[in-house]
Image (cartoon, grey):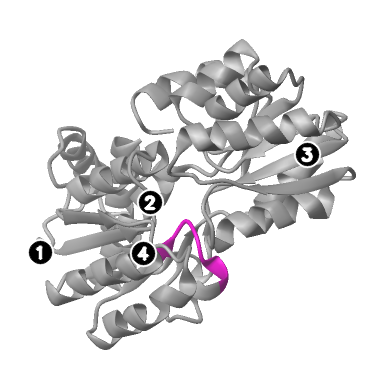
Amino acid sequence: MSAVLAAVLGATLTGCSSTGGKRAEERAAKAAQGRAAVDTPRWTFAMVTHSGDGDTFWDIVQNGAKQAAAKDNIKFLYAHDVEGNKQAQSVQAMIDQKVDGLIVTLAKPDAMKDVVAKAEKAGIPVITVNSGSDKSKEFGALTHIGQDEVIAGEAVGEQLNQRGRKKAVCVLHEQGNVGHEQRCEGVKKTFKGQVDNLYVEGTNMPAVQSSLEAKLQSDKDVDAVVTLGAPFAPTAVKAAQQAGSKAEVDTFDLNAKVAGGLQDGSLGFAVDQDPYLQGYEAVDLLWLYKYNRDMLGGGRPVLTGPQIVTKDDAKTLAEYTKRGTR
C-alpha cells in the first residue's frame, strides 16, 4: 500500500513531465525500503489519543502513521491516555516540545477544547482522527479523519435487521466516550428491534465478561450482542457461552482475532473503519499541508468507513490483520 501511495504522490508532484514516471518509481522504491520518498525538512508530528493500554486498534493506527512518517521524512511521536484530562496534558507536553503538527482524538471533547486552541495559537496545525468529527471544525482543526459514528451505528442496525434479530445489547466499554454513545444511538435509529445499552468497565476484561454474562442470563430474549471494539468481541463470545445464550456476537473494528472469529462462525459480522488508513492519512495530510497547504476534502471530514465485514471477507482480510494493517 505504501509503495502505491508513494507512486501516486510522486506522479502528482511531477505532473506530466517526461521524467514523472521515473521519479515516481524512484520514490516508490525508497518508500518500500523504509526510506523517505521526499526531500522536505525533518518535521516532527505527534499523535495523542484516548487509547487505553493494550488496545490493538491503536496499534494498527500507529502502524499506518509510522508508515506514512517513514515515507514523508517525519519524526513520529505517540502518547495516549484514556482519561481526558491526562490526554490533554500529553497534548500540552507536545506543544511545549514545539512539534510541527498534531493529531488528536476528541473522544472527551470538553477536556480537549482548550489545549487544541493552545496548539493553534502556537501555530501548530491540528488534525483530529477517529472520534470527534462533530467538534473538529468547531475546535479549529484542519480536518477530521475517521468514520461517522452515527452512520456506522445505523449500518449495524440495518445489518441486524437483515439477520432477523429482535433484541440487541450494545456494550459500551468507556464511560464518557461520545463516539461510543453515537454508535449505539445509530444502532437504535435503524434497528427495528429493541436495543439496551450495557455499560462495562473496559479496563477490566473479567468484569466485562461477568457483566455481560449476567445480562444474558437475566434476559433470554437478547439475540444479538454488539461490542464497540475488537478486543471485547472474544470476551462477549465467552460470556454468551457461559450464560447458555445463543445470541450472535457482532463488533465494531477488526483485528486478527475478529477475523478468525468471523471465519469460524463465532462472530456474525464486524464494522471496519480502517484504523491503518486513519493513521496513514493523518500523517500524510499534515505533511501535504506543511509542504503545499493542501487539504483533502476542503476541510470536510474524510471518511474511512464503515465497511461491513462478514465471513465471506474474513479469509482475504486475515493476512492483513496478521501483519497489523487491518
Q: Is residue 33 left or right of residue 297?
A: left
Please say if the residues under marks 3 and 2 sit with CB atoms less than 8 Å apart.
no
User: What element does badge 2 sit on?
Assistant: loop
Q: Could you give the CA–CA distance between mark 4 and mark 1, rounded to whole angstroms?
A: 22 Å
Query: Which residue is found at the position 57% from the left and 59% from the top?
Result: 179
Q: Which residue is mark 2?
A: 51
The answer to whether 120 is drawn above or below residue 223 in the figure is below
**Nearer to me, 182 or 202:** 202
Amino acid type, residue under disc 1 in the picture: Pro
Give the residue number, with chain letter if any, for mark 1. 41
Q: Is residue 93 left or right of residue 284?
A: left
Crowd class of label 4 (few under 14; some 14 to 19; many from 20; radius 10 Å): many
Q: Earlier in the sequence, mark 2 or mark 1?
A: 1
Looking at the image, is mark 4 or mark 3 earlier in the sequence? 4
- Which amino acid type corresponds to the residue marked 2 in the rendered image? Ser
**Spatial separation of the CA atoms under disc 2 and disc 1:** 30 Å
Residue 18 or residue 246, whichever sits in front: 246
Label 1 environment density (alpha carbons within 10 Å; few <14, some 14–19, many ≥20)? few
Q: Residues within 10 Å of mark 3 (few under 14, many from 20)?
A: many
Residue pictured at 65% horizontal, 30% vertical: 213
Q: Which residues are magenta?
A: 128-134
Q: Which numbered disc flags the more N-terminal residue, 2 or 4?
A: 2
Residue picked out by circle 3: 168
In this view, the mark in front (2 or 1): 2
Of callouts 4 and 1, which one flags the residue occurring earlier in the amino acid sequence?
A: 1
Q: Position of residue 177 (x, y in %)?
A: 53, 60
Residue type, mark 4 in image: Val
| Residue under label 4 | 104
Decide: marks 2, 1 in contact (CB < 8 A)? no
Which image quarter is the C terminus in?
top left
For residue 193, say whether it is visible.
yes
